[in-house]
């Protein structure tokens, strides 16, 4: 049976506006779902039901005065535990921040909260957003609502699983190499990574600053557009945030894709792509053609170097960003009697960081060290230029590009934990949009033979979110998938 | 061939205490990852400028206005070892003779 928490944000917003339901009723439905399923899913690290109830009651009182409300008001929302939240524990899935309670809100959350979104908690993620399966969380993995023996993807796996299982209507994640789109794909939800800089990173705990992008996990393309309309726009507190006010991205969403030039990325359809993924994406591309799109083959000749470039650039930036965890001003300080402050730092970082974070800090430290910098980091930055040029050339011929989001559907927990390189290959199709800063979205496009969701990725040029969302919306409507996982669909 | 790295040197630079088991696992894993990453060297790119940010911005300023700041107690809320308004740490210099 469909509960209130299974509706989309736009459906709920209409019911709230008409007075059919109250914000408290919507919230209670969401909290009850978490009570029912999250022991199994483990999407949340911290829950905030009392704060949420207080908030929902305020909103209902405010609405009863007849005041106009934002389309995010009263909607149960979760945040990946990498966004700082004033007075609410924020861990990044790491022991080193286990007891950290930030004294300020991230801009992304401040904007949603200011418009009346209701926070029900902070979601589990790979430690410091480093991972593609959520198995790198220091607090235990998240399980995929479609099959709890499988991973939900990562690093925003808690956010994706919470949305897929109806625990919240939508959630924020972050995407540095695919960490919104890949879990969206594996969990059967919509994951939007907008243009780099469109949403402020202020209060987002940094991983790789030239790649980190705030993104959304939703159950419809319209909801992604609604959130982006609130989240976007210049923030003076983030020097990389782009000029300009937020736009209404829901405008023109249903204008269709007749005549849209769609390029299928040739380099993303070969070796390593599971047959179920290839078939699902292929059928969806046929649907786009049936809707009047002009489909052709696009090439990104340097895409084969993207993964290598990414695994030099992201760890390099991470080794620098994570230098701040030194046990001095916040977070873990290793207990004991240390000979001096440097010994304390060594012990704190040794105890506080998990295996994947250590691996990437070490990798980045090596890549930036004397004698290796030019060959690794310097060369990776040049590859980045070549990938951007590839995209520019492809977008001369096409309006949007299509590929699978991930080469596979959800894989079993434990299947790749001992092989970092196999794990990194999950992000092979999502990384290029981070290196180039371009907006990209993953939407569910079908099921494989095992009944697991397949995700399709659309990419558009910088700041062409309207076009990206319009194409995604047209395809979503045409496919008309029912995306309720067995865990909540009932008998 | 996997890249051979001096794991003790890198761990020192990164300020991370590692167990012997961690060192041997990391030495092997980083060697394999770097072998793959070295693929970037296959591309002739001498005349290609590097990209640090995909959407470059320069001279980003904001208005120089006074805004409320965090109270000291709030700013120091997470300090592991505190002495009034100061942060206490183990000694940071050699003891003088």
Image (tube, coloured by chain):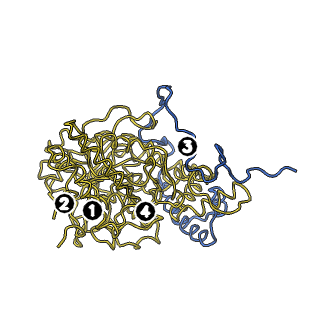
Chain colours: A yellow, B blue
Looking at the rendered image, the disc whose residue lies closer to the viewer, 3 or 4, is 3
Q: Is residue A372 above or below residue A135?
A: above
Contact flag, marks 1 and 2 (Cβ < 8 Å): yes
Q: Is residue A399 visible?
A: no
Q: Is residue A13 visible?
A: yes
Q: Which chain does the residue under circle 1 lie in?
A: A
| Label 3 SS | helix
For the residues labelled 3 and 4, the Cα–Cα distance comes to 37 Å
Query: Which chain does the numbered disc 2 sit on?
Result: A
Q: Are marks 1 and 2 on the same chain?
A: yes
Are callouts 4 and 2 both on one chain?
Answer: yes
Q: Residues within 10 Å of mark 4 (few under 14, many from 20)?
A: some
In this view of the protein, which residue sits in the foreground, A54 or A189? A54
Instruction: Find disc 3 in the rendering and name its residue.
Output: B75
Count residues near mark 2 (Cα–Cα under 10 Å), then give few for <14, some for 14-19, many for 20+. Answer: few
Q: Of the two numbered discs 1 and 2 on the same chain, state the one appearing first in sequence.
A: 2
Measured as percent of width and height from the top left, residue A108 is found at 38, 43
Q: Classify 10 Å Cα crowding around label 1: few (below 14), some (14-19), many (20 and above).
A: few
Distance Cα–Cα, label 4 vs label 1: 36 Å
**Sequence-first disc among 4 and 1:** 1
Kindly indicate whether the residue at mark 3 contacts the one at mark 2 (C-beta within 8 angstroms): no
| Discs 3, 4 touching: Cβ within 8 Å | no
Which residue is nearer to you in this view: A84 or A282?
Answer: A84
Check disc 4 and report the residue beneath it: A424
Mark 4: secondary structure = helix
Left or right of A329 in this view: A271: left
Image quadrant containing the N terminus of chain B = bottom right
- Residue to which mark 1 is pinned: A32
The residue nearer to you, when weighing A284 against B80, is B80
- Judging from the image, mark 4 belongs to the subunit labelled A
The residue identified by callout 2 is: A3
- Estimate the x, y position of residue B88 in percent, counting from the top left: 68, 50
């Amino acid at each position: 049976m469909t509960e209130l928490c299974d509706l989309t944000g736009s459906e709920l917003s209409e019911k709230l506006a008409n007075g059919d339901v109250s914000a408290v009723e919507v919230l209670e439905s969401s909290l009850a779902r978490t009570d029912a399923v999250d022991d199994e899913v483990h999407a949340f690290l911290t829950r905030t039901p009392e704060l949420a109830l207080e908030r929902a009651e305020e909103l209902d009182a405010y609405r009863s005065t007849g005041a106009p409300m934002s389309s995010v008001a009263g909607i149960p929302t979760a945040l990946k535990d990498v966004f700082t939240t004033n007075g609410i524990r924020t861990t990044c899935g790491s022991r080193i921040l286990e007891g950290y309670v930030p004294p300020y809100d991230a801009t992304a959350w401040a904007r949603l909260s200011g418009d009346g979104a209701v926070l029900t908690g902070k979601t589990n993620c790979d430690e410091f957003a480093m991972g593609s399966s959520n198995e790198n969380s220091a607090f235990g993995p998240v399980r995929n609502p479609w099959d709890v023996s499988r991973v939900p993807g990562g690093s925003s796996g808690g956010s994706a699983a919470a949305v897929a299982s109806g625990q919240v209507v939508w959630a924020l994640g972050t995407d540095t190499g695919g960490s919104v789109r890949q879990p969206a794909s594996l969990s059967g939800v919509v994951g939007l990574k907008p243009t780099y800089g469109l949403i402020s990173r202020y209060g987002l705990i940094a991983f790789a600053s030239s790649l980190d992008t705030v993104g959304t996990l939703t159950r419809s393309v319209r909801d992604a557009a609604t959130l982006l309309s609130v989240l976007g726009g210049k923030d003076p507190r983030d020097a990389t945030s782009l000029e300009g006010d937020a736009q209404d991205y829901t405008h023109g969403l249903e204008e269709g894709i007749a005549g849209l030039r769609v390029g299928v990325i040739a380099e993303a359809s070969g070796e390593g792509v599971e047959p179920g993924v290839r078939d699902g994406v292929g059928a969806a591309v046929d649907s786009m053609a049936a809707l009047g799109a002009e489909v052709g083959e696009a090439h990104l000749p340097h895409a084969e170097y993207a993964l290598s470039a990414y695994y030099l650039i992201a760890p390099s930036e991470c080794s620098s960003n994570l230098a701040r965890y030194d046990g001095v001003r916040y977070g873990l300080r290793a207990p004991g009697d240390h000979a001096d402050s440097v010994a304390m730092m060594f012990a704190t970082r040794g105890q506080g960081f998990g295996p994947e974070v250590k691996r990437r800090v070490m990798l980045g430290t090596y890549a930036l060290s004397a004698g290796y910098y030019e060959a690794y980091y310097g060369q990776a930055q040049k590859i980045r230029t070549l990938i951007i040029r590839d995209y520019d050339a492809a977008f001369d011929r096409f309006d949007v590009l299509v590929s699978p989001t991930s080469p596979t559907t959800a894989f079993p927990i434990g299947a790749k934990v001992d092989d970092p390189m196999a794990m990194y290959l999950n992000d092979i199709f999502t990384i290029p949009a981070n290196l180039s800063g371009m907006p990209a979205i993953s939407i569910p496009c079908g099921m494989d033979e095992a009944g697991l969701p397949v995700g399709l990725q659309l990419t558009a040029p910088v700041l062409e979110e309207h076009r990206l969302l319009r194409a995604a919306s047209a395809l979503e409507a045409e496919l008309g998938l029912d995306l309720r996982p067995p865990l909540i669909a009932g008998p | 061939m996997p890249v051979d790295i001096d794991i003790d040197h890198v761990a020192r630079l990164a300020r991370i205490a590692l167990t012997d088991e961690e060192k041997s696992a990391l030495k092997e894993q980083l060697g394999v990852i770097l072998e793959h990453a070295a693929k970037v060297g296959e591309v002739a790119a001498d005349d290609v400028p590097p990209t640090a940010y995909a959407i470059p911005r320069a001279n980003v300023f904001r208005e120089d206005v006074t805004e409320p700041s965090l109270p000291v107690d709030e700013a120091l809320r997470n300090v592991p070892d505190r002495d009034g308004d100061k942060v206490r740490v183990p000694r940071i210099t050699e003891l003088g003779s």
